[in-house]
Image: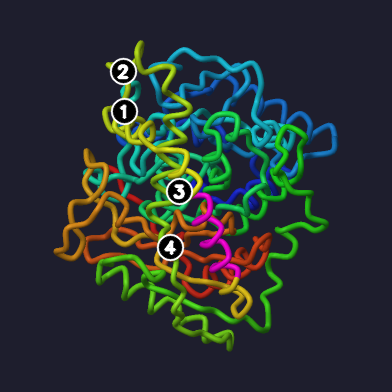
């Protein structure tokens, strides 16, 4: 196998190869490091590299295989960690000058579980400051570029993670999603991203962002659906550090992945009752993709689900959460914060108690509407985003299909399911005429990541995308 193919191998296949020593963890790790050294200066996906640690971990992984020791689910597999996730002994900046030299003393739960499962950490991936926006740049590390078009954004806030996976700079990435931050860059970069049900993977965002923390989910970003199931098997399960964390499931997502359901009722929406505009290429790709499920004799219907008020609810929680978190830093750090983040904080500081309580009530109404939908359907399908990747340097596109849009109009399909906590994934479903990926979102019932993964796997089988690889000169 040539080096490029090794870099784009699935994590599940890497795991099997390492177990048999067909390829050692050291061989795989060194090959990916070599590619990172070549490609990362072009796309700026990694912001902090841990090659010495990776080499040491890979060496220990191969020794464990030779000694016949019990191996973890991710034994010897190279993995990246988003720079919003605290990692013991590894610089974690949150993309902010405030934390430019921050070295955490402990791992968050998801990172600890990845380590315990045997992964090889390659480094931290770039993110906007505190993950506050859907593109990836910051004042420490600069701009991350989309591997399919270097003048376009990879999305965000897990933009570095998605750009790395899409470019063959590691098969697994840990991302996080507070309004679409796993699914947005997965869509723009042409890979698979899963936002599990809220609480499935423990996190501590409530301590950081107040009530907005209940919007935030950790999740996998990968090239193969089976690798997302593998990562979920490792990271899922309750932990006393997170009162909202869910008990570990009594089955393996990976083992059940191939059990494609005989009967599925799919409802699809191209606007969720409030999205004002969608790019025609995105619309056509998603409609065509949905119809492919007819091959499984599944029921497919266009639905009239209406999630009004979601934009105002999202905006209220989002800006007030950052205001709560960062107000104490404004006086000292204002000239070193992203101007867009400062604007968001200032908006959040102006909300009244009544505004916050109204948003909480409306959030419950949105949740009830989504639950009503799932009384009649097993899966909801939408576009992941209303457009393809736009130019770097912009926080949002100015228009879609000739229509001027507001700042959230390009991502109306993602954040509703942070509001409700339902599991949702983005899967590649097509390409624009200028060669940019298009994503389709697959949303499941509460606690039902398994069906989301199984439907994703069924679509991957019908329309595989992994043969497409970005080219770098």
Name the residue nearer the viewer: 27 or 405: 405
- Tell me which label, 4 or 3, sits earlier in the chain: 3
Disc 3 to disc 2, C-alpha distance: 25 Å
Residue 240, placed above or below residue 269: above
The residue to which callout 2 is attached is 334
Residue at the farthest left position: 402
**Which residue is located at x 34 percent, y 59 percent?**
437
Quadrant location of the C terminus in the rendered image:
top left
The residue to which callout 4 is attached is 428
Q: Which residues are magenta?
A: 359-371
- Tell me which label, 1 or 3, sits earlier in the chain: 3
Judge left or right: residue 131 versus residue 109: left
Name the residue nearer the viewer: 351 or 203: 351
Judge left or right: residue 434 versus residue 221: left
Quadrant in which residue 273 is drawn: bottom left
Mark carried by residue 300: none
Residue 214 x %, y %: 58, 44
Say how many tags the image has.
Answer: 4
Q: Nearer the viewer, mark 4 or mark 2?
A: 2
Residue 267 x %, y %: 51, 78
Name the residue nearer the viewer: 41 or 382: 382
Disc 4 to disc 2, C-alpha distance: 39 Å
The residue to which callout 3 is attached is 179
Quadrant in which residue 25 is drawn: top right
**Which residue is located at x 68 percent, y 65 percent?**
257
């Amino acid at each position: 196998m040539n080096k490029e193919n090794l870099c784009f191998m699935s994590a599940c296949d890497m795991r099997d190869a390492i177990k048999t020593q067909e390829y050692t963890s050291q061989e795989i790790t060194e090959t990916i490091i070599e590619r990172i050294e070549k490609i990362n200066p072009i796309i700026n996906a990694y912001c902090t590299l841990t090659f010495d640690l990776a080499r040491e971990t890979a060496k220990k992984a191969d020794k464990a295989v030779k000694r016949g020791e019990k191996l973890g689910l991710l034994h010897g597999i190279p993995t990246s960690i988003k720079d919003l996730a605290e990692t013991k002994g590894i610089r974690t900046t949150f993309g902010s000058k405030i934390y430019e030299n921050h070295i955490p003393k402990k791992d968050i739960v998801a990172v600890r579980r990845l380590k315990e499962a045997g992964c090889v950490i390659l480094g931290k991936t770039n993110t906007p400051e505190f993950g506050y926006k859907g593109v990836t740049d910051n004042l420490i590390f600069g701009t991350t570029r989309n591997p399919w078009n270097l003048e376009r954004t990879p999305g965000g806030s897990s933009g570095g993670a998605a750009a790395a996976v899409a470019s063959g700079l590691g098969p697994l990435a840990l991302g996080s999603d507070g309004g679409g931050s796993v699914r947005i860059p997965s869509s723009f970069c042409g890979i698979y991203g899963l936002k599990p049900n809220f609480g499935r993977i423990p996190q501590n965002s409530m301590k950081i962002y107040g009530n907005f923390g209940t919007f935030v989910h950790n999740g996998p970003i990968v090239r193969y659906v089976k690798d997302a199931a593998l990562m979920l098997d490792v990271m899922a399960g309750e932990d006393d550090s997170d009162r909202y964390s869910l008990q570990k499931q009594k089955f393996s997502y990976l083992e059940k992945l191939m059990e494609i359901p005989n009967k599925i009722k799919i409802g699809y929406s191209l606007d969720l009752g409030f999205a004002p505009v969608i790019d025609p290429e995105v619309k056509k790709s998603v409609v065509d993709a949905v119809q492919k499920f007819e091959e499984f004799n599944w029921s497919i219907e266009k639905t009239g689900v209406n999630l009004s008020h979601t934009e105002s609810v999202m905006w209220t929680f989002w800006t007030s959460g950052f205001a709560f978190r960062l107000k104490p830093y404004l006086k000292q750090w204002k000239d070193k914060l992203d101007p867009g983040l400062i604007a968001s904080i200032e908006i959040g500081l102006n909300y009244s108690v009544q505004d916050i309580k109204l948003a909480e009530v409306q959030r419950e109404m949105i949740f009830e509407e989504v639950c009503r939908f799932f009384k009649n359907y097993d899966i909801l399908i939408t576009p992941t985003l209303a457009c393809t990747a736009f130019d770097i340097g912009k926080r949002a596109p100015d228009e879609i299909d000739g229509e001027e849009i507001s700042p959230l109009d390009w991502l109306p399909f993602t954040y509703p399911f942070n509001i409700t906590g339902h599991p949702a994934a983005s899967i590649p479903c097509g390409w624009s005429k200028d060669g940019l990926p298009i994503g389709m979102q697959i949303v499941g019932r509460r606690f039902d990541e398994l069906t989301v993964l199984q439907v994703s796997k069924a679509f991957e089988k019908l329309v595989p995308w992994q043969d497409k690889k970005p080219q770098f000169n």
